[in-house]
Image (spheres, rainbow, N blue to C red):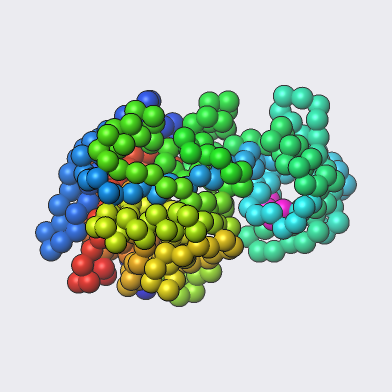
Amino acid sequence: MRVDLFDFDLPPERIALRPAEPRDAARLLIVRPGRAARFEDRAILDLPQQFQPGDVFVVNDTRVIPARLRGSRVRGLASAQIEATLIEREDEASWRAFARPGKKLKDGEIIRFTASNSAEHLDAEVVSKGGDGEIVLKFALLGEALDSAIERIGQMPLPPYISSRRRADQRDEHDYQTLFAEKSGAVAAPTASLHFTPRLLAALEARGVTLQKVTLHVGAGTFLPVKTGDTSGHTMHSEWGEVTQATANVLNHARAGGGRIVAVGTTCLRILETAAANGRIESFSGKTSIFITPGYKFRAADVLLTNFHLPRSTLFMLAAAFSGLPTMRAAYAHAIAEHYRFYSYGDACLLFPAGAEETV
């Protein structure tokens, strides 16, 4: 499909720089597709009223690591500052990363990353370079020692549309983690889950709704706009994920009993759809680069809770695949007109699936 079909104009003031306080004070736009799509302006705390006993919410239990490192080149221009955002671990000592500026970096060059609040530093060698500022860094430490050093030296990797307007601070260390964060490995938050609080979970439980966890370590590629003219020319970054057999069994049993599977976020939806490649949710552990666009036949989820996404992004394409592109364009126009807050720290929408005639 033409990528420009997924473009829209968003006033800068609609981009949220901080989350709602408390988290469950965010707004919720309910989107029901149809020939005359219906939109309901609600609040996140109204979420339980939309569901029944037997429905299952699926959340992502990944934990965001402080993947943004700042330092300088040791050789050459010693004063040149470098910022690297870790993308994906290659081995015990190496990470792929986006470097800024990365154009003048050379293979074999050493970058010394430093902590903002201490004299501690961490050295890494540039072992290869790719396009768009992508590099592979081999660190002087490995394994758990490297993990611990990154935790101490790194900063929260806020999305570009936030970090371009302010730097990460101590508050983001809490704000940019979900209530379910357990397994370290993400370099971006599964933002639909940022709205959840103990109060909201208690209300869902009282409604008879249960919760299951999956893992998808979200990569920085989630924020990249599609730069090709057609979706067929875009290559997704791969991300590691897991659906256990126990979780798959619970979800299949719930569906067989008439319960609905609610994917909390596009990350959950992508790993569930990866695990349901044969039409039934199965156990899965490995990398996925699934790219979902309009025309895709969903197999694993019945409802999607998600935030408002970037224009021309793979996430907006996924939402359009789920509820229909005309419906989602109208829903986003409604959200902009009604002053909803967009992107990672913004409000949410609850999407119901489109019929076949509404997908494009």
Residue 183 falls left or right of residue 197: right
Q: Is residue 337 visible?
A: no
Q: Position of residue 306 (x, y in %)?
A: 36, 48
Image quarter in which the N terminus is found:
bottom left
Q: Magenta-highlighted stretch: main secondary structure?
A: strand
The image shows residue 287, relative to residue 216, as above or below, that is below
With 143 as the anchor, is 336 left or right in this view? left
Quarter residue 230 falls in:
bottom left
Residue in view at x 79 percent, y 40 percent: 145
Residue 75: percent from left, percent from top: 88, 47
- Identify the magenta region: 95-99
Q: Is residue 114 above or below residue 139?
A: above
Residue at screen point 58% across, 44% down? 183
- Residue 96 sits inside the magenta stretch: yes
In the image, is 66 to the left or to the right of 81? left
Query: Number of callouts in the render?
Result: 0
Q: Nearer the viewer, residue 260 or 150?
A: 260
Q: Can you tell which quarter of the image residue 348 is in?
A: top left
Residue 217 picture location, percent across and down:
56, 51
Q: Is residue 120 above or below residue 147?
A: above
Query: Residue 9, position in %: x, y?
Result: 33, 51
Nearer to the camera, 32 or 116: 32
Residue drawn at the location 33% of the way across and 49% of the way down: 56
Q: Which quarter of the rendered picture does the C terminus lie within?
A: bottom left
Inspect the magenta stretch and tell me whether residue 156 lies in it.
Answer: no
Pick the residue in front: 212 or 94. 212
In this rendering, is residue 5 above or below 308? below
Asked if residue 284 can be seen in this view, the reply is yes
